[in-house]
């Protein structure tokens, strides 16, 4: 893998393919390797994107459920070189880096945005038309319907009825909750 040093393009996000059910174990192992080998200057972040939602069971009890968005994959922000490749590749549960042959390929900026790796990792799932309550800002406590959701899921437009008129309000997704 000595040609990896030539591919070094600075810190980028790479995808590690794992065996089924090993995502959390691989993430913890990578974090231990970073700590034990003092690699925090070349391996910056390890993530497993999830969606967190609240469900209600048959007895009416609320339960928080995390669902992996990309099962069997762990995302690692790192400088790709021989030492980082050799630190991660032999970890138990790691199948390979994603890329053609043995050559890891970094994610593009668009792919990083789409996977929401630099922003919010856990969010409640919303759909247009959902009844929501505003929890933050000058309209806190007002209720409305979800009118739009941004492509990245970080911003929403809520249709609020005030003074007998419907008014669209753009908000951060963290400023609302489902009713």
Image: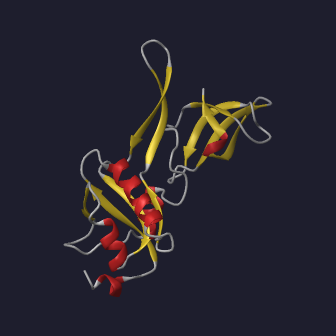
Let me know if residue 105 appears in the view: no
Q: Is residue 69 left or right of residue 96?
A: right
Which of these two is toward me, 102 or 69? 102
Tally the marks.
Answer: 0
Which of these two is toward me, 134 or 168? 134
Residue appearing at x 56%, y 44% in the figure: 148
Let me know if residue 137 appears in the view: yes
Can you give x and y, in whole percent of width and height, for residue 100 in the image?
22, 72
Q: Quadrant of the N terminus?
A: bottom left
Q: Examine the rendered structure and indicate whether residue 120 appears above or below residue 88.
A: above
Which of these two is toward me, 39 or 63? 39
Toward the bottom, the furthest residue is 6
Residue appearing at x 58%, y 40% in the figure: 147
Q: Examine the rendered structure and indicate whether residue 162 appears above or below residue 34.
A: above
Colouring style: secondary structure
Can you give x and y, in whole percent of width and height, for residue 57 in the image?
43, 18
Toward the left, the furthest residue is 101
Q: Examine the rendered structure and indicate whether residue 80 appears above or below residue 130.
A: below
Q: Examine the rendered structure and indicate whether residue 99 appears above or below residue 9.
A: above
Can you give x and y, in whole percent of width and height, for residue 113 in the image?
48, 61
Can you give x and y, in whole percent of width and height, for residue 176 in the image?
64, 38
Toward the top, the furthest residue is 59
Which of these two is toward me, 128 or 174? 174
Q: Quadrant of the C terminus?
A: top right
Q: Is residue 27 left or right of residue 2?
A: right
Residue appearing at x 77%, y 29% in the figure: 164
């Amino acid at each position: 893998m000595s040609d990896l040093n030539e591919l070094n393009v600075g810190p980028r996000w790479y995808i590690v393919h794992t065996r089924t059910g090993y995502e959390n174990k691989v993430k913890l192992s990578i974090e231990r390797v970073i700590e034990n080998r003092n690699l925090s200057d070349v391996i910056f972040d390890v993530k497993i994107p999830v969606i967190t939602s609240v469900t209600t069971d048959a007895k009416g009890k609320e339960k928080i459920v995390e669902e992996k968005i990309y099962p069997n994959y762990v995302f690692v922000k790192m400088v790709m070189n021989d030492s980082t490749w050799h630190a991660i590749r032999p970890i138990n549960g790691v199948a390979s880096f994603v890329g053609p042959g043995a050559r890891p390929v970094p994610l593009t900026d668009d792919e990083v945005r789409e996977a929401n790796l630099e922003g919010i990792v856990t969010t409640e799932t919303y759909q247009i038309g959902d009844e929501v309550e505003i929890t933050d800002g000058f309209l806190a406590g007002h209720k409305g319907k979800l009118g739009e959701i941004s492509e990245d899921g970080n911003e929403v437009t809520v249709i609020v009825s005030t003074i007998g008129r419907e008014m669209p309000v753009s908000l951060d997704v963290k400023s609302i909750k489902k009713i």
